[in-house]
Image: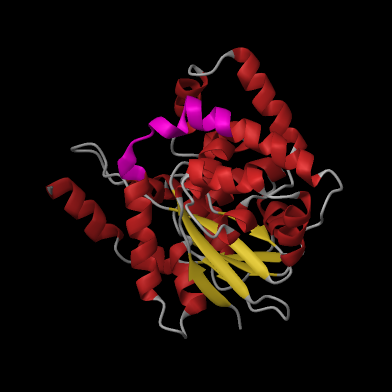
Amino acid sequence: MYKVEVDFAPMYECIASLNAFLWKQNHNAMDGGKLWVREVQARFAPVQLQRMREIITLVEDFSLAPYIWSCPGDRSVSGFMHWFEDLSAGELFEIAGRFGQSVPSNLAELRNSTSEILRAWDAGYFSGINPEILEGLSREAEARRAMLNGGNDMEVFEQATEGMRLYPAEQLKQVIIIPQYHPRPLVTSAMYDEFVFTSYSCDVLPPEEGRPAPALLRLTRALSDETRLYILRLLAGKQLNFTEIVKQVGLSKSTIHYHLIALRAAGLVIVHSSGKSVSYSLRLEALDNLPHQIGAYLES
């Protein structure tokens, strides 16, 4: 049985915000969406943006999560970067090896490229974000950590991720869950033999006055589409994998992928994950408080 640990540091959110900005395929699925991307893009010169895209392609499979988790001191952006940039090639390889990462021969070069893009991102965007975002994420991590009682690790993981069910595996020992804000409502994981790092969506800022909470919006939007309702009906009482859903619905893989993201974001499906095997089933408890949520919003 694996153990769950809750972790948070500003450096995690710096990485999450950069990935949210550069991963074009996720822009339509994110709460911030293309409007946020355009606003941030205006802060950088075209040559900087081009360099960022070049580097992110080079370091695509190089995850910093094991390094952030292993950092022994200050894990603010400046504190982490100082430690990370001072690591020798041998120390870089040692940390990567500890997590079973496939270690490229140019690891030190990848570190240097990663440092370059992160420093540019921090200077141009991340250092100026609303401090309430980081404060809220830190409070969320403390609250989630307090839920762990030594025997409810799977339940805490599923609750934090709004329906991801990670089953024990022979080698899996440690699952680190990290609250994130910028990629909301996406949940992302970096998986290794003995470790899994999962960053889960967290709404840490209140909605504008008179506006509905993001969670209520995601739920009502997910239920407003005929295809998504049909997928939920297919998943009632059984588990289907992605290929089976595509076959039964009869739409393209990209369209089904988009609908599943919306259903996942609303907490309406359970994602059953065991090794490389993933399947989906209906999560009806997401609807338990819907009438109360709508009533409370309309009467507020």
Q: In the image as oriented, which residue stretches furthest toward the top?
A: 46
Q: Is residue 299 above or below residue 1?
A: above
Residue 282 among magenta residues:
no
- Residue shown at 35% from the left, 64% from the top: 142
* Predominant secondary structure, magenta span: helix
Q: In the image as oriented, which residue stretches furthest toward the left?
A: 299
Relative to residue 197, is residue 123 drawn left or right?
left
- Quadrant of the drawing holding the N terminus: bottom right
Relative to residue 27, is residue 275 drawn left or right?
right
Can you see residue 259? no
> x and y percent of residue 95 in the render?
71, 60
Relative to residue 92, is residue 229 drawn left or right?
left
Return the residue nearer the eye: 74 or 61: 74
Provide the residue span drawn in magenta: 119-133
- Residue shown at 57% from the left, 54% from the top: 68
> x and y percent of residue 164 in the render?
54, 65
Which of the 4 image quadrants contains residue 31?
top left
Return the residue nearer the eye: 119 or 297: 119
- Residue shown at 37% from the left, 55% from the top: 138
> x and y percent of residue 38 in the render?
49, 21
